[in-house]
Image: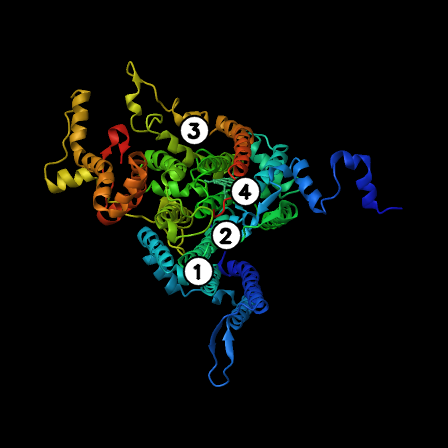
Amino acid sequence: MHGHVSYEDFILQVAGFLTTYYLFIAAMNGLAAFYLWQSGRAKELFRLPGSGLAVTTVHVWLLVAGVFTILSAYATNGGAAALTLPQAVRDFADARMGPVVYTVGLLLLLSVLYLGRNFFVKPTVAWAGLNLSLLLMGISMTDMDFASIVMKPDNVPIVAMIYLLGFFTWLSASKAVQNDARTARGEVPLEKLDDEKVLVWPDLVYTELICMIALMAILFVWAILLQAPLEEPASTVKTPNPSKAPWYFLGLQEMLVYYDPWMAGVVLPGVVVGGLMAIPFIDFNKQGNGYYTINERKFAYCTFQFGFLVLWVTLIVMGTFLRGPNWNFFGFYETWDAHKVEALNNVDLSQYFWVDLLHTGRPKAADDAPMIVKIGYILLRESVGIMLLLFYFGGGPPAMVIYSKFFRKMFLRMGFVRYMVLSNLILLMALLPIKMLARWTVDMKYFVSIPEYFLNF
Amino acid sequence: MPPLDEIIRGSQIWKSVFRHPAPIDRRNRVVVMLTNFFLHLHPVSIKKQGISLSYTWCMGGVTFFLFLVETVTGVLLMFYYRPTLEWAYNDMLALRDVASLGILREIHRWAAHAMVITVWLHMYRVFLTGSYKPPREFNWVIGVILLLLTLLLSFTGYLLPWDQLAIWAITVGSNMARAHPFLGHEGPGSALLTLDGIDMITNASDARFGLLGARFVGEETLNRFYVLHCVAIPLAAALLMAIHFWRVRKDGGISGPL
Ligand code: HEM
């Protein structure tokens, strides 16, 4: 994709971008310092020994603003190439990165953020995290492979989405933490304090007007800076490699690694839509209606975040940035090489059972046997997987009630029908991570493999 | 002579449109909300937290605004675009190189991407504030359908430039329909649907064929997606949005702690 651009030319292009970029971050920090100083919200961090002068967050963000200003000036004056991650670090990161590390790593990261939310929602901590991530983005932009993927016109919105999601997750968690602390003290949630009524004209109408103007301005700037992609004219004979669906469906395309199209493209998306629609009818918890809270609805919060942030968003990001030719996995700084070969030695459950365990070979009907006999043999061949599946869906819901106090309470409060809907939705959602784990640990290809009828599971 | 704005406001023409004085006092601020067609979507007064940006993130409103931007730029684009194999791609080139207002296509495309993102963020906020709980269950369900329609709008529009990006993305996406259980010719169970030994579900009669209007992405598909994108889905979405907004008010306005 960038084969014809030399690294020197590339750096020259990037330098201009980085100058503005670092200057923007510097301005951001300067504004933050100014705001803290003016509003008197600065926090004292420590006192200088001797003079006893207080060092506050104002000083810290001013210092950060200074550092970014220097980086910006440095990038303009031909230093952009030096503002980079050492090649060894990049190679190390690429070598270690894979679907497993990426997915499990993000899950762990989000879990840590969740468990330590009282700490991470503090404005100082969150702001530091934002600065760090922006710096990492900046120095990664000097890598040609990284830049060529991130700067693809259709991918820019996804980078924006990641930051927007980060911001709003922080905002909501921060309000939830405050509200939960207030509830613990016996106070009402923050939202309750704004109970008084105001007139829609001017209070809401003007807000809307300002929002519209700001949005229009953003759209114009965005449209001027970034041209809509237009590739070569359509050709039904030249298949691009990789061929990717539109970005918002890349989570589904990523699922194709683990499931056949009928599951990844039809059944599981259907479950997502149906599951979303079912939420109001299976969440019987009356608390947490109309204000941000986590403690009052931990189960709902965690389940939704697992589905949305971990499964939906994470897989889209992976499908967009980390899947290259032949849908192979590529690290953030790795060149998309169409000749990269990944050994696929996935094995069906029936193979494990009949061949590896029983050493008999898989049962097979004679070629001229009647249809019904053939089907019988297929069912026999796949009996282990089918039984496993029946056990999973048939045994799962009651087992949850019997062995988990939490689900037992739920069952008693929800009644049979709602409980069955909830437990089956959870079991269906868990199918994807289960298949992923099975693939990563024992190279599981299909639990039930009936290619004769396109029924591979 | 009285100031110009008084002359305008006092004229018969102005008064025929706006039937009351400027909304600068309390009475007229109430009246404007009741007599203006566009504003009557809103209530007259509202709880302070219902309009707090940090509560609603304004994401539903932003999504709606982006939908309007898409409608306006989309109509303008339709002046320039012909959905045929002969013209579609060339019209794209002309839009880029010849047409004045050369960022029309850009605004349309980026606003479409943005709309997908804001609709997710809106759903995220509605979930996090528990606003789907009674009495707002039904509006959440309408919302999920709107989310689906937003994705389909974006998906059908993706094909129209008729470049490599477009047809292969739609090919990859619509190949899923081929595997639809029973209804796709490579889906589980479809082999069972036979009549006197003749397969009923073939590559010329299955779900993908219905979507594409052909066995592969071609001229019929372009036409089909064009109609879906410019007429059918926007109409459905507009209708559902009207219901969605109406329900927000009927369900007691923006949610809040009891
Ligand atoms: C095209 C898509 C959509 C548009 C234009 C839209 C627009 C809006 C607007 C303007 C509001 C008023 C409050 C606010 O701005 O937050 C609202 C509220 C609401 N929306 Fe949507 N929405 C859309 C999609 C969705 C989706 C995907 C969901 C959920 C899955 C949803 C569920 C709701 C609910 C439950 C409310 C009431 C919230 C409350 O009372 O706090 N909407 N919507």
Quick check: is the Cβ at mark 1 less than 8 Å away from ligand 1?
no
Residue A216 located left or right of residue A426? right
Specify whether residue A181 is in view: yes
**The residue marked by circle 2 belongs to what chain?**
A
Choose mark 1 or mark 4, whichever is in front.
1
The amino acid type, in three-letter code, at marker 1 is Val
Is disc 4 surrounded by few (<14), some (14 to 19) or many (20+) residues within 10 Å? many
Residue B64: percent from left, percent from top: 56, 40
Dots 3 and 1 on the same chain: no
Q: Amino acid at mark 2?
A: Glu
In this view, the residue in front, B170 or A265, is A265
Category of crowding for the residue at label 2, using alpha-carbon neighbours closer than 10 angstroms: few (below 14), some (14–19), many (at least 20): some
Disc 3 chain ID: B
Does the rendering let one see residue A3? no
Q: Cα distance, mark 3 to mark 1? A: 50 Å
For label 4, the residue is: B63
Helix, strand or loop status at disc 1: loop
Q: Position of residue A4 (x, y in %)?
A: 49, 52
Which residue is located at x 17 percent, y 36 percent? Answer: A384
Tag 4, which secondary structure? helix
What is the distance, in whole Å, between disc 3 and disc 2 at their CAs? Answer: 53 Å
Element marked by disc 2: helix
Earlier-in-chain disc, 4 versus 3:
4
* Residue type of the residue flagged with mark 4: Thr
On the image, which quarter does residue A421 sit in? top left
Discs 1, 2: same chain: yes
Write down the residue under mark 2: A191
Q: CA distance from mark 1 to mark 4?
A: 27 Å
Mark in front: 1 vs 2: 2
Q: Which residue is mark 3?
A: B216
